[in-house]
């Protein structure tokens, strides 16, 4: 059966779509928790009521004011003390003991297959209460009924092994309730760690048909290391960019904060950590999030070998018996147990809290996928050759930052450059892909459907434009190509004027017609001239500059990375190199203004303007010469 590109959004409950129940395994801290007293009465203690927080701060407003004043002069201690004391008091009920057991008698508010079935929840509440991922399940319900969707709950403070054991029991309940032999799983983030652990420990039962893991924290999360080392360093530029994409903001604000200094926030957060640790420090899940490369270091710093022996024993098992198995256990699920296990992960974004490796803003790509990845600001060198042959398939990402040949599932992992954590639904490529991976058997691997190549550049509307060359496949460039296809991604009816297209190959010129206008969803083919180098495995950067109708920001641009596949592979020592994109302004005579403009927060805007002027001048010169 062939499913059209519009099939996911247009088809009904037709043949070819799985009728198996779908288990949603949500992100961290998703399930609500209640305290159970001796009489069996339940009082919800998580989620927190965030409306109460302003009142708490107002009760200590004088101290907060003093703390803010002190922070202006570089001292974060007082403000951290006030906020930390209130946070510790407010989160008292979710504390755990030295051995990792809950200090209070807590349980998920809704538990078991019957209570968490989406139809049961809808009939009882009618407002989406306790139901996860409404946008994604809304798409699913075009193909399966609400009664086939289940919302797995667990005490997420527990380690992944315990949560995976709970998931196994939950699936047995669904099989008995629905009379089915198997289920499908859709999960994200922490749910990905729980699911990958479940598949490692219980995959042999063959109770799962399809398991689609999006931005999974399978190998941990660098944010935990940043917190435990008290070295949180927020990337405000990336944080604003993150918010833009989550809210589908089509005006580019992030470059406006590139020079802002919010270092005092980092100081406050780092001073807050000891207070927060007294709440979260004995959660097993926190320790399972700790990356293996720094696990022993953090254990020695924070955990007592006697008092915390039970936590250590469980997390040691996770780090030394489960995580190292992921490369073989997940592959075994596909090859021997008849499953379709897949991963969709974000790449090429900096971590919002400081961890050096690139990822989706929250989870490093290496932890999500098992692949070898470069650190932020670096890439593999021109001429780099992937570590594993993979039957001759090319497995290096277009930005040359990911070697997919080393992934947990080299042929069943999709990498999306610029995909922020948890924003799978807002990218048209990933939105359709996850539906097919979860609900059909059509996509067996990354070669099954040419519409879904292994490497994709995010088409979130906040990026405004997307581009690819016409013949080499998305992310690649060769002599076969004749033009660059540029598409308007906006969803607010905005027309775009394409002002310039430049790349860092000398002599290559893109022929942008004056006043080239793109309406919402439209594409234009922009031809190019010049000689491409006869080289392969080399990175090329292409920048598209545009103005958007009714935009609050006057000029925008997007730089996309491509890999040149056009001849001999140059020799290299394999050492990573800088991934910084050199713009025409960087090479200009005005380089002496570099420091001043960056401090003033104007460098990005000036560089964008210069790129357009550079392109216009170059085009004028070419016209005169002709």
Image (cartoon, rainbow, N blue to C red):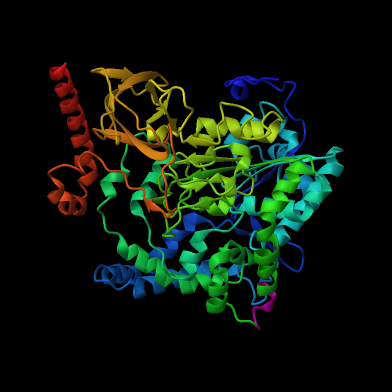
Q: Specify whether 101 is left or right of 382.
A: right
**Bounds of the magenta span?**
306-311
For the question of whether residue 47 can be seen, the reply is yes
Place residue 314 in its image quadrant.
bottom right
The quarter in which the N terminus is drawn is: top right
Percent coordinates x, y for residue 30 in the rendering: 61, 52
Position above or below: 608 against 320: above
For the question of whether residue 152 can be seen, the reply is no
The quarter in which the C terminus is drawn is: top left
- The residue lying at 44 percent from left, 64 percent from top is 56
Position above or below: 614 against 270: above
Q: Specify whether 617 is left or right of 67.
A: left
Percent coordinates x, y for residue 53 in the rendering: 45, 60
Percent coordinates x, y for residue 210 in the rendering: 72, 39
Tally of marks: 0
User: Is 109 covered by the magenta stretch?
Assistant: no
Place residue 553 in its image quadrant.
top left
| In front of the other: 410 or 192 | 410
Place residue 404 in its image quadrant.
top right
Percent coordinates x, y for residue 207 in the rendering: 81, 44
| In front of the other: 542 or 367 | 542
Q: Specify whether 617 is left or right of 347.
A: left
- The residue lying at 72 percent from left, 67 percent from top is 37
| In front of the other: 99 or 51 | 99
- The residue lying at 67 percent from left, 70 percent from top is 316
User: Is 309 covered by the magenta stretch?
Assistant: yes
Position above or below: 143 against 606: above
């Amino acid at each position: 059966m062939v499913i059209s590109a519009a099939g996911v959004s247009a088809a009904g409950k037709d043949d070819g779509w799985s009728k198996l129940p779908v288990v949603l395994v949500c992100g961290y801290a998703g399930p609500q928790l209640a305290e159970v007293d001796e009489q069996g009465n339940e009082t919800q203690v998580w989620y927190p009521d965030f409306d109460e927080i302003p009142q708490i701060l107002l009760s200590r407003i004088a101290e907060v004011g003093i703390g803010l004043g002190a922070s202006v002069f570089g001292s974060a201690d007082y403000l951290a003390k006030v906020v930390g004391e209130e946070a510790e008091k407010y989160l008292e009920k979710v504390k755990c003991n030295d051995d990792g057991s809950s200090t209070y008698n807590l349980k998920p508010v809704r538990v078991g297959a019957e209570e968490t079935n989406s139809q049961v929840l809808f009939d009882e509440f009618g407002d989406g209460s306790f139901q996860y991922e409404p946008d994604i399940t809304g798409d699913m319900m075009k193909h399966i009924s609400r009664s086939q969707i289940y919302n797995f709950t667990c005490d997420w403070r527990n380690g992944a092994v315990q949560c995976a054991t709970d998931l196994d029991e939950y699936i047995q309940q669904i099989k008995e309730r629905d009379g089915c032999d198997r289920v499908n799983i859709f999960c994200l983030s922490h749910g990905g760690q729980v699911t990958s652990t479940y598949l490692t420990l219980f995959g042999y039962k063959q109770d799962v048909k399809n398991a689609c893991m999006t931005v999974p924290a399978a190998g941990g999360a660098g944010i935990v290391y940043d917190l435990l080392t008290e070295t949180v360093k927020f990337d405000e530029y990336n944080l604003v960019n993150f918010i833009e994409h989550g809210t589908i903001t089509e005006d580019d604000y992030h470059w406006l904060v590139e020079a802002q200094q919010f270092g005092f926030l980092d100081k406050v957060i780092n001073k807050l950590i000891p207070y927060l640790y007294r709440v979260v420090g004995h959660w097993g899940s926190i320790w399972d999030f700790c990356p293996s490369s720094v696990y022993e270091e953090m254990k020695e710093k924070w955990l007592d070998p006697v008092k915390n022996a039970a936590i250590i024993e469980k997390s040691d098992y996770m780090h030394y018996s489960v995580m190292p198995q992921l490369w073989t256990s997940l592959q075994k699920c596909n090859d021997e147990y008849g499953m379709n296990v897949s991963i969709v992960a974000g790449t090429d974004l900096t971590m919002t809290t400081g961890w050096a490796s690139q990822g989706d803003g929250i989870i490093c790509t290496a932890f999500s996928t098992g692949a070898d990845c470069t650190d932020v600001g670096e890439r593999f060198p021109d001429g780099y050759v992937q570590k594993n042959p993979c039957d001759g398939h090319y497995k290096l990402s277009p930005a040359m930052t990911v070697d997919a040949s080393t992934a947990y599932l080299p042929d069943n992992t999709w990498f999306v450059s610029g995909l922020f954590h948890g924003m799978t639904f807002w990218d048209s490529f990933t939105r359709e892909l996850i539906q097919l991976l979860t609900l059909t058997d059509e996509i067996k691997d990354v070669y099954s459907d040419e519409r879904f190549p292994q490497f994709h550049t995010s088409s979130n509307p906040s990026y405004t434009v997307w581009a690819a060359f016409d013949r080499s496949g998305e992310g690649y460039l060769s002599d076969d190509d004749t033009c660059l296809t540029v598409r308007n991604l906006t969803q607010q009816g905005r027309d775009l004027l394409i002002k310039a297209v430049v790349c860092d190959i000398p002599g290559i010129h893109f022929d942008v017609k004056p006043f080239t206008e793109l309406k919402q969803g439209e594409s234009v083919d922009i031809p190019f001239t010049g000689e491409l180098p006869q080289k392969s495995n080399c990175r090329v950067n292409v920048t598209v500059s545009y103005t958007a109708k009714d935009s609050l920001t006057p000029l925008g641009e997007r730089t996309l990375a491509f890999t040149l596949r056009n001849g001999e592979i140059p020799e290299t020592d394999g050492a990573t190199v800088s991934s910084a994109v050199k713009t025409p302004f960087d090479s200009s005579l005005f380089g002496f203004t570099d420091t001043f403009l960056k401090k003033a927060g104007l460098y990005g805007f000036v560089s964008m303007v210069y790129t357009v002027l550079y392109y216009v001048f170059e085009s004028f010169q070419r016209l005169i010469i002709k």
